[in-house]
Amino acid sequence: MRSPRVLPFVALAAAMLATAVHAEVGKPQEVAPGVWFHEGDVARRGHCNNGWILFRDQVLVVDANFPSGAQDVLPKLRALTDKPVRFVFDTHHHGDHAYGNQVWAEAGATVVAHEGVLAEMKRLETGAFGGAPGRWEGTAKDRPDVAKSKFRPPSLLFPRQLVFDDGTQRVELHHFGVAHTRGDGFAWLPNERVLFTGDACVNGPYNFMGDGDTAEWVKTLEAARALKPKFVCPGHGLMGGPEILDNQITFIRTLRTEVKKLTDAGKTPAEAKAAVDTIKAAIQKDGRIANYVGGMFASQVEKVFVEFGGKPFESALRLTPGAREALRARAAGKPDRFAAFVAGR
Ligand SMILES: [Zn+2]
């Protein structure tokens, strides 16, 4: 155990490390020769982070981003290399990581993902698979870039692992289990010890927990940490070192410990909701993970409460366009398919 007196210095050291490896939002940063990281503008445009890796005669891009994110990144990548982008790797099915697939496909890329990504798309992107409007259609109502583009699922799928190795560069795509979603993939560069995590690991208040499982999530992150990366490129927020993985694990673990106290004590959803600020304060006391607390915190508490057997809160803290759609429908007295999706979060 660290004494409380030491903690601020640990946090400061971590912050300094993060600063040392931080470029700026929207500016490509070369993590290692031929390995690039690009921090997306999440605050204003909802964009995820991207990576790209140069091979002898091709480029592999990590995450498709939203269509406007892909359009933002593509010319920056083009300014650095004229090698063709042959592959784009969706780390998971969420729109801010996968809805730009069509943009990359038009630039000549094949979309690659863990097979759980396609499975989740078939479950949630019903509009694209011949059913009722799904998440894409919900998002398109709020995002002109999505409205103007076309949903495109991955077409090259891997069950556990897929390796790209041309003798000059090696990238291993891994699925270590359920985490942020049921199809999270990591891109691991063993030679440079660089790990791209997608949203299985974020650096800041960006944990959307609705599609994952927090108990499995911790195990998956531990498998990723066992790789011993030197550089960790998260799905959102600043890149840094392995401390980002540690912090993400600590955040989820602390959240689970605090919420379990509520279910163990038999608290009702209303009582659990009333305890959100107390749990928030407990987490904010730990300088390593205080920055993980943000606008989604109440829904994170609710998700874990439900995982431990509690009932969902009557909460208005819903962030995705699909969720807003559900609230609109619910308010109009006609709950639609999104109501079930919201209730499950
Ligand atoms: Zn995500």
Image (cartoon, rainbow, N blue to C red):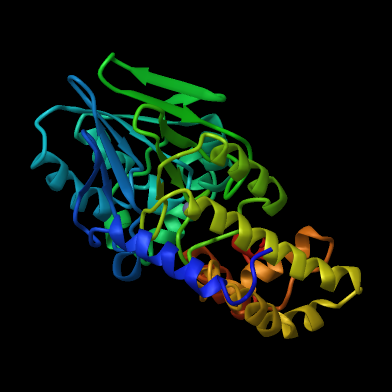
Residue beneath the point at 51% across and 74% down: 8
Q: In the visual, does 52 lie left or right of 287?
A: left
**237 is higher (above) or lower (below) than 52:** below
Q: In the visual, does 61 lie left or right of 159?
A: left
Farthest residue, direction top = 167
The quarter of the picture where the C terminus appears is bottom right
Residue beneath the point at 50% across and 66% down: 10
Q: Nearer the viewer, residue 340 or 296?
A: 296
Q: Nearer the viewer, residue 121 or 215?
A: 215
**99 is higher (above) or lower (below) than 172:** below
For residue 44, what is the image quadrant? bottom left
Residue beneath the point at 65% across and 71% down: 3
Residue 100 visible from this viewpoint: yes
Q: In the rendering, at what x and y percent does residue 212 appear?
A: 63, 51
For residue 61, what is the image quadrant? top left
Q: Nearer the viewer, residue 89 or 249?
A: 249
Report the label total.
0
Residue 40 visible from this viewpoint: no
Q: In the rendering, at what x and y percent does residue 344 appear?
A: 69, 60
For residue 42, what is the image quadrant? bottom left
Q: In the rendering, at what x and y percent does residue 204 appear?
A: 46, 65
Q: In the rendering, at what x and y percent does residue 321 appear?
A: 46, 66
Residue beneath the point at 56% across and 53% down: 246
Q: Nearer the viewer, residue 326 or 216?
A: 216
The quarter of the picture where the N terminus appears is bottom right
